[in-house]
Amino acid sequence: MTERAAALLGALAEVEQRIRNLVAARRAVDPAPDDPYRGLYISEERVEQLLANARAVADPPAGRARIGHGPLARLAQACGLDGADLDLLMTALAPEVEPRFEQLFGYLNDDVTRRRVSAAVAFELCGLALTSGADRARITHGPLPTSGLLTLEDPDRPLASRALRVPERVVAHLLGDDTPDPDIAGLLAPLPPVAWGDPLPLARALEGGANPVYVREHGTGSGRLLAAGALERVGRGVLNVELPPWPDADRAREALRLLTREARLAGAGLVLGPVDRLLLAPGLLDELAADVPVCLIGSESWDPRWSRRLPLRIDAPETTLAERTALWAEQLGLEDPAGLELTSQFRLSPEQIHHAARTARAAAVADGATGIGVEHIRTGARAQNGTALERLARRVSPTVGWDELVLPEAALGGLREVALRARHRERVLSEWRMRPGGGRGHGVAALFAGDSGTGKTMSAEVLAGDLGLDLYVVDLATVVDKYIGETEKNLERIFTAADGVNAVLLFDEADSIFGKRSEVKDAHDRYANIESAYLLQRLETFDGLVLLATNLRANIDDAFTRRLDVVVDFPVPEPEQRELLWDVCLGRHLPRADDLDLRFCAQAFTLSGGAIRSAAITAAYYAADEGADAAVQMRHVVTAVQREYRKLGRLTLAEEFGDYWSLLG
């Protein structure tokens, strides 16, 4: 028997003695104490007794429940119970622990079918009066019912005959079982063992009676870790609650009651978030009890309309680059953080770093590696990306690298600059404060300008792969809306989702969204300019890596160009580059015939990189159709070029194909 169970049985011994006294008093005036049908009908003698108002009343208890220093004492202190409340609680608890009390209560209730104590019998046992408003309040809206320790059953009955019940979770707690209520167990999430931030200011606020407290998270900061550290400093446990999207306010209200009761039983404080999940009904936040420390977590500014109780507002700062590097080293089990510069582009919170490191270790084990490599760390970091952005943009897992890019040195230099800005933006923009004031974000924005097929999208994929990030290509169909204001809303959803994801965001055909503002001649011009103005502001506050690709650079507004960090021009490739492109696009696995003349193809056919790739794939299909041992020949290539010319609407001229004209069918 556990210590808690022994203490509970000791407290029930006093309840049993009171029951003995009341049973003896009832039997002394009962006209038929041995009637086997007692409780199933009312005899003539019993009717006469009731009419004569001869109801026996037990002597009041000699003393209230002795609280002591065990779980009952902690529960009484947490819920504000006095001796009479504890007497009622123990009386209602008796049949939950000892089945013999059921029959005794059936006798005292004068109804063998009612095995729980009624309010009238409980009051009689505890020396309370049904005619006292203060005593009745103890079971209707006093600390016992409001704390979730006692419920009244049979709502259609008069109060005197309603049964008192102690919820099973409370019974289990008093018997030593601290398993959370099944209805809320799924909401409780253990916090990772990560030490971060300074919880002292928040701990001082809690000690000073601040309740609730709203901790607003910014970017890579963690309000939950700060709140948990503060609660532990003031001697409280922590119930970390991940709030789901509630289907209705009633479900949320009931969950808050159960969570508050769980916190009282555990002597803990509540860490609840995200707070916007509690805004589906007015006043829902007012359900939080004032006697339980509550730390609300969110990323939005507090609106006074959310609750009548205004919280103390505290900001959780963003993690610094040094803090994140140290956390990576700690979570990966590395004594020296040197060599972890590759993590600088990942904007993760401390909890996300913990989970990413665990995923990286699992990936290393799955690969059979002796240590954790770069790709394992990148896998762990990418695993922290949510799916919100995938509903708004198309995710591309990078599969190409720098070696497959064929561009002029100027364009390659621009792309490398984008990569270095993405890697070192935390140091330059945060630590060195090179972009101060104005609420500006820590993002990097670049424009890729050039004709179709010159390598803009592929370059974005190479950048994402080099940085260990996913590439998200925004589908314009999910953005542009004919109704006024809807396009801005769609863009805000995309940027908000991208803020929480470590990824490269690519707007293809960006001139359709980021076009030039025009002179206002009608309402359409006015709202088009408002859309552009919104984008100008949103780009400045974005914390991620955004790439704008366009075929028409002249159509991009100059104000956007000023806000861009890098502009990369993609020219049509020269003959030397086209020869290299033919070689790269045909790859290393495709067999080549001796008659293949890539230099001639480069000199004769003025094609973009995208067109060359398309022609190379077409030639490979022609070769594959000739058998397993076939190789790509010059006739396959020139035929593929002819097909590409037709797609582009270009004429096929004999002088352009030279000696290979005869190979065309």
Image: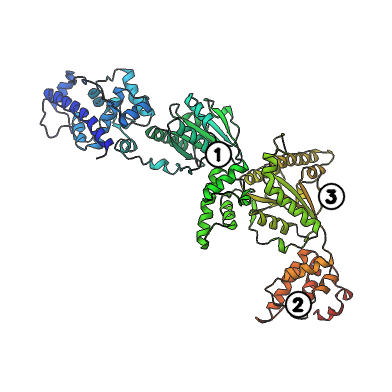
Residue that appears at 34% across and 30% down = 75
Q: Is residue 585 above or below residue 386?
A: below
Q: In the image, which disc is placed on residue 222?
A: 1
Q: Nearer the viewer, mark 2 or mark 1?
A: 1
Q: Nearer the viewer, residue 260 or 161?
A: 260
Q: Is residue 308 left or right of residue 112?
A: right
Q: Nearer the viewer, residue 496 or 519?
A: 496
The residue that disc 2 covers is 636
Residue 618 image offset from top left, x and y in percent: 73, 72
Q: Is residue 654 above or below residue 567?
A: below
Q: Is residue 405 above or below residue 564?
A: below
Residue type indicated by callout 1: Ser
Question: What crowding class fits label 1: few (fewer than 14 Cα within 10 Å), some (14-19), or many (20 or more)?
Answer: many
Residue that appears at 27% across and 19% down = 129
Residue type indicated by callout 3: Ala
Residue 498 image offset from top left, x and y in percent: 64, 46
